[in-house]
Amino acid sequence: MTYGYEPEPRPRPGWGNPRAVVDAVEGQAGRAASARRDVADVTGTATSDDGLLRAVADGGGLRELVIDPRAMRMPSVDLAAAVVALARRAAEDLTRAREERLRDLGVERLSVDLDESLGRLQELRSLVEAGHGDMRAVYERFRREAGR
């Protein structure tokens, strides 16, 4: 799952200052990375209806599974199915909790890969700093390669 930061409406940097374009994108990427760190500690929890099973999920998957000894009386197939269903519910709760935390932070979920965007930004920065060619051509190439 990838998150990006969509700030309040902002003035677009002009062509006269390519450094402003790079700085604006870096600022947005920095805020997105900060939001990613802010949700890293969020967990999702699910408990079975009878209270005999409890699962906790985090970004790495199932972090904790508590099985009351009384649940061991269930047939193993039923217990396994209950654990899988509970883990799925904990993961769904994690997604909900993360989205809630991001909303509280004012971050909108986007389908942008932050690491890929940062790599492309570094490439653009190199082109700008090296002064290769027309800035509009550099931007158009960057936009074309980014799929926009």
Image (tube, helix red, strand yellow):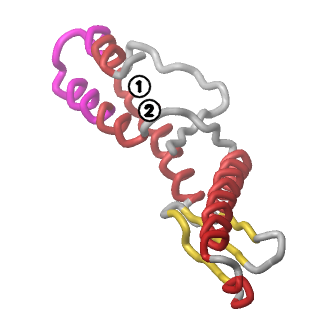
In the rendering, which numbered label is found on residue 21? 1
The residue type indicated by label 2 comes to Val
The image quadrant where one finds the C terminus is: top left
> For the view shown, which residue lies furthest in the bottom direction?
69
Residue that label 2 marks: 25
Q: Nearer the viewer, residue 10 or 89?
A: 89
User: Which element is circle 1 on?
Assistant: helix
Residue at image point 66% right, 83% down: 67
Considering depth in this image, is 78 or 138 the residue closer to the camera?
78
Q: Nearer the viewer, residue 107 or 46?
A: 46
Main SS category, magenta section: helix
| Amino acid, disc 1 | Val
Which region of the structure is painted magenta? 121-138
The picture quadrant where one finds residue 47 is bottom right
- Residue 42 picture location, percent across and down: 63, 63
Horizontal side of residue 38 vs 54, given as left or right: left
Can you give x and y, in whole percent of width and height, for residue 100 in the image?
A: 73, 50
Residue 109 vs 80, above or below: the answer is above
Does the residue at mark 2 contact the one at mark 1 (Cβ under 8 Å)? Answer: yes
Q: Which mark is residue 11?
A: none
Q: How many marks?
A: 2
Residue occupying the point 48% across, 63% down: 60
| x and y percentages locating residue 104 in the rendered image | 73, 50
Label 2 sits on a secondary structure element that is helix
Which quadrant of the view contains residue 132?
Answer: top left
Residue at 55%, 68% (x, y): give it: 62
